[in-house]
Image (cartoon, grey):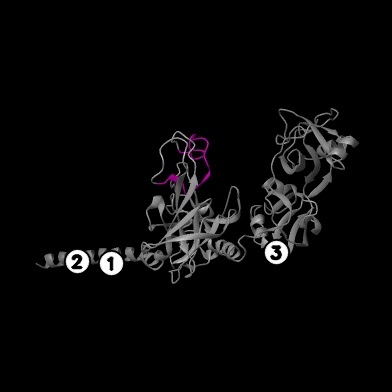
Amino acid sequence: MKTMRAVATLWLAAFGLTAALSAQAQRDLPDFTRVVEDQGNAVVNISTTQAVRRAGGGAMPQVPGMEDEEVLEFFRRFIPRQPGPGQPGPGPGPRSESRSLGSGFVISQDGYVLTNAHVVEGADEITVKFTDKREFKAKVIGADKRTDIALIKIDATGLPAVRFGDPSKLKVGEWVVAIGSPFGFENTVTAGIVSAKGRSLPQENFVPFIQTDVAINPGNSGGPLFNMRGEVVGINSQIYSRTGGFMGLSFAIPADVALDVQKQLKEKGRVARGRIGVVIQEVTRDLATSFGLDKPRGALVNSVEKGSPADKAGIEATDIILSFDGKQVDASSDLPRIVGSTRPGSTSTIEVWRKGVSKKLTLTVGELQEDRVAAADKPRPQKSEQAQANRLGIVVAELTPEQKKELKVSGGLVVTEVRPDARASDVRKGDLLLTLVHKGQHTELKSVDQFNKLLAGLDKNAVITLQVKRGETMAFVTISGLTDKG
């Protein structure tokens, strides 16, 4: 009998321990219900219509990249255009409507709504639908394609509005929640964690994206990303996908970026961004070594636009911009973001690395008119005399006075041949070599003999950088190692 009591006691103790562990596990798991109950009513479904003309044959246009799996649209926008109900049959003829479904959220009780610019782009009519089935027609106050933010307005008051949080306080690994209308399923809730912060995406220079693994699909565009305190920390905007659907990589626009944009859209209907007039490129480890920099950081200036704020401030090609207004430039992608968020007309301090020494300059920020990026252009054919190959495996020649005048340069050497075994494989025939950089020392190239002597005096494992003019574009090419001395 005592044995049975002992077994029963042990069983009850084990059961109690299991129940306690289960309760503890439940307490440790995140509970998203409070966020949804408090903030879900401020999230809206957005549908748009646009008058279009069918091309004929009844076939809808293909999504770019979907016709060939090898040719993919890297960052696919969420909202595919779909034919609306009651459209005419196949073939050309009467105008029909195209529908788009997206998401948004109310930011003020008097009817201002934030969403993505691509959700409302080209729309003739915008309808905002709430969870209680109320529907309102909306008008666009302003849209900014560079950040993909749009501010729209509905005629209503006393609306539920979201609260905003500070995305800079987000931690990688922190739980976040998305609410939106994927594939038209309104008020769908998905959750995940912050995967990374400050992501730079191709062709997106002005947004430090929040990367998450929250399930995001077509229709989530423009919807809010909440932290566990029920505060909006981002706007879901893009996904990485090979199929058009969710694959675990989602990107949100930080809330502080969105708030700054919406403020300008509300006040002026457009966004003013700063610019300084430089073309830049990333600083690689080899470039950092060539320029005598302690580690790869900053933005290397390829060229300076004449008469630009940078030109007036004394910034030169081959400078490496290390900071702007006290904000560190860790990667070249940081600079457009920092400068773009600076109000035109303001005075800023810029720190550059020039010939092995840090230097501070002051400039007045201009206003961005158009994007300028470093890109490879077709080399301009040059007339030159043959010279002997050097330790880089390239053949160079000096420019005639007429060529210097035509190309608007005072010196430099033209590449007439690149041997198959050349160390300078990134250099092309027709390139102009203007400067050689080694251990922070910059030497302007003036003659073939001078250039070859410079190369002859370097160690076999030397890392050098050449300033190259290719067509109308400046670039820096780094070369690690030379051939043995002949």
Q: In this view, does 20 lie to the left or right of 331?
A: left
Task: Give the mark nearer the N terminus: 2 vs 1.
Answer: 2
The answer to whether residue 245 is left or right of residue 255 is: left
Q: Position of residue 173 (x, y in %)?
A: 47, 59
Q: Main secondary structure of the magenta part?
A: loop
Residue sitting at x 40%, y 62%: 130
* Category of crowding for the residue at label 3, using alpha-carbon neighbours closer than 10 angstroms: few (below 14), some (14–19), many (at least 20): some
Q: Above or below — where is 90 with respect to 170?
A: above
The amino acid type, in three-letter code, at marker 3 is Asp
Write down the residue under mark 3.
Answer: 325
Q: Which sits in the foreground, 143 or 6?
A: 143
Q: What stretch is highlighted in magenta?
A: 60-84
Q: Which label's residue is closer to the chain start, 3 or 2?
A: 2
Query: In the picture shown, does residue 301 fall above or below 259?
Result: above
Spatial CA span between label 3 and label 1: 54 Å
Q: Which residue is drawn at 80% across and 51% down?
A: 306
Instruction: Name the residue: 40% across, 38% down.
Output: 89
Task: Give the residue type that dot 2 points to.
Answer: Leu
Q: Which residue is drawn at 74% across and 28% down?
A: 419
* Quadrant of the rendering where the C terminus is positioned: top right
- Tell whether label 2 touches label 3 (CB within 8 Å): no
Task: List the residue tagged with mark 2.
Answer: 12
* Residue, disc 1: 20
| Residue 446: quadrant of the picture | top right
* Visible residue check, residue 347: yes
Badge 2 marks a residue whose secondary structure is: helix
Q: Name the amino acid type tagged 1.
A: Ala
How far apart are the alpha carbons under marks 2 and 1? 12 Å
Q: Is residue 81 magenta?
A: yes
The residue carrying pointer 2 sits among few (fewer than 14), some (14 to 19) or many (20 or more) residues within 10 Å by Cα, namely few
Image height of 366 relative to 66, above or below? below
User: Residue 139 location, x and y as percent?
Assistant: 51, 60
